[in-house]
Amino acid sequence: MKALSLRMLVLRMLALAFILWLLSSSLSAAEPNLLGDGLSVTNPSMSNSAGSEAMAKWARSCALCHITGEANAPVLGDTEEWQQRLQKGEAALLNNVVNGINSMPPLGYCMSCEAADFRVMIDYMAGVK
Ligand code: HEC
């Protein structure tokens, strides 16, 4: 009798572990889709995958400061402010993003970003494309 209930307990724990495993694997598979869909709604022009990947990084790293204007960051869509900054030229802007400038942190906290990502992000914030 005792041995039987122990076996039941082990079986139940195995079943529970299996269910948890199923849940976690289906959740992690769904995550990138949720993020991708959410972003394509806010920014339908970025339909190509390179662009939407850059926009996912933007949402994770840059949005933090560039939506609210935290520490005087130029705000998303403030075309006048961005026009002034664009006048420095793309090379100077990219250089300031990579190395940081004043309260703008180096790489904007995006360690996986490349120059191509930054170009997409700058055009997006400046409302150029
Ligand atoms: C911690 C807040 C913060 C984060 C995160 C951040 N920025 Fe900034 N950013 C700033 C601030 C503040 C400035 C204004 C700096 C100045 O000109 O004094 C700025 C300025 C800029 C500029 C203009 C630079 C210039 O030379 O005029 C660009 C381009 C820029 N950010 C891009 C980005 C990108 C792309 C990301 C994400 C990868 C990012 N930022 C993340 C705060 C932030």
Image: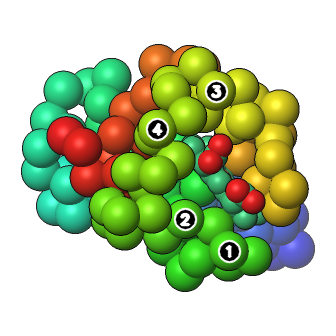
Placement of the N terminus among the 4 image quadrants: bottom right
- Amino acid type, callout 1: Asn
Is residue 1 at all visible to an observer of this figure? Answer: yes
Tell me, yes or no, whether the two marked residues, 4 and 3, touch with CB atoms within 8 Å: no
Residue on which the image places disc 3: 92
Q: Please tell me whether residue 62 is drawn above or below residue 66 in the rendered image.
A: above
Q: Please tell me whether residue 52 is drawn above or below residue 67 in the rendered image.
A: above
Label disc, if present, on residue 74 of the rendered structure: 2
Tell me, yes or no, whether the two marked residues, 2 and 3, touch with CB atoms within 8 Å: no
Residue on which the image places disc 1: 72
Position of 12 compared to 23: left or right?
A: right
Going from N to C along the chain, the mark reached first, 2 or 4, is 2
Q: Is mark 1 within 8 Å of ligand 1?
A: yes
Q: Secondary structure at mark 1?
A: helix
Going from N to C along the chain, the mark reached first, 1 or 4, is 1
Q: Secondary structure at mark 3?
A: helix
- Distance (Cα) linking label 3 and label 1: 19 Å
- Distance (Cα) linking label 4 and label 3: 9 Å
Q: Position of residue 36 (x, y in %)?
A: 30, 47
Residue on which the image places disc 4: 87
Residue appearing at x 30%, y 31% in the figure: 51
Going from N to C along the chain, the mark reached first, 3 or 1, is 1
* Mark 1 surroundings within 10 Å by alpha-carbon count, few (fewer than 14), some (14 through 19), many (20 or more): few
Q: Is mark 2 within 8 Å of ligand 1?
A: yes
Q: Secondary structure at mark 2?
A: loop
Q: Is mark 3 within 8 Å of ligand 1?
A: yes
- Amino acid type, callout 4: Gln
Tell me, yes or no, whether the two marked residues, 2 and 4, touch with CB atoms within 8 Å: no
